[in-house]
Image (cartoon, rainbow, N blue to C red):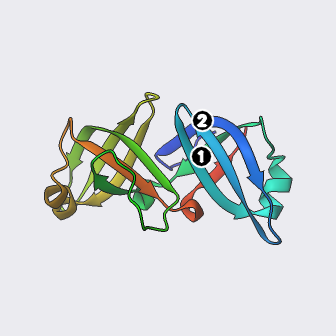
Amino acid sequence: MRISARNQLKGTITNVKEGAVNGVVTIVVGDDTIKADITMEAITDLGLAEGVEAYAIIKASNVMFAIGSERIAGISARNQLAGTVCCVKRGAVNGHVGLKLASGSIVKGSITNEAIDDLGLAEGTAALAVVKSTDVIVGVE
C-alpha cells in the first residue's frame, strides 16, 4: 500500500463496536491503542474484526501536539499517543514534527512554526500526538 499519508501504523484490531451508521475500530500498535470512527459499510467491506491486522492511517495535518506524557483530561480526541520528539523540520511557515512512540513507531505531524516554538518542541521533548478518531482511516492488505 503506497499512499501520501505520513502515518501508517500497523497493528491488530482488538475491538469493533458497531453502531447504526458508524462503528469504532480499536487497533493496538505496540503499547498504544488507536480508535477509528468509520462507517459500518467500510467495516463490513474491509472485513474488520477482532484479530485482523490493520493499519491506522493518519494525515500529518490531522495530528496535534501537546507537551508532556500524561493523557489530557477533558478533551474529546480519543487518541493520545505519548512519545519523544525525534525530529523537527521547519519550512517557511509550517514544520513537521516526528514523535517516536515506545513501540518504535513514529507519528509525524504538520504544524505551524509558531506552534513548534510556543510548545517548545525539540528533539528529546516528551510530547503527546493527539488525533480525533474521525481523522483515522483504517487500511488492510
Left or right of 30: which side holds 27?
Answer: right
Q: CA distance from mark 1 to mark 2?
A: 6 Å
Left or right of 119: which side holds 22?
Answer: right
**Which amino acid, mark 2?**
Lys
Quadrant where the C terminus is found in the figure: top right
* Residue 34 locus on image (x, y percent): 57, 48
Q: Earlier in the sequence, mark 1 or mark 2?
A: 2
- Asked if residue 124 is positioned above or below residue 74 in the image, the reply reads above
Q: Tell me the residue at 52%/52% (across/down).
A: 58
Label 1 Cα neighbours within 10 Å, binned few <14 / some 14-19 / many ≥20: many
* Residue 61 locus on image (x, y percent): 41, 60
Label 2 Cα neighbours within 10 Å, binned few <14 / some 14-19 / many ≥20: some
- Asked if residue 41 is positioned above or below residue 32 in the image, the reply reads below
Query: Mark 2 and mark 1 in contact (Cβ < 8 Å)?
Result: no
Which mark is drawn over residue 130?
Answer: none
Q: Tell me the residue at 79%/47% (across/down).
A: 48
**Which amino acid, mark 1?**
Ala
Quadrant where the N terminus is found in the figure: top right
Left or right of 129: which side holds 38?
Answer: right
Quickly name the residue at label 1.
56
Q: Secondary structure at mark 1?
A: strand
Q: Secondary structure at mark 2?
A: strand
Nearer to the camera, 52 or 14? 14
Nearer to the camera, 15 or 96? 15
In the current view of this chain or complex, which residue is farthest to the front? 73
Q: Quadrant of residue 87?
A: top left
* Residue 19 locus on image (x, y percent): 80, 67
Which mark is drawn over residue 10?
Answer: 2
Q: Tell me the residue at 20%/48% (across/down).
A: 121
Q: Tell me the residue at 62%/35% (across/down).
A: 11
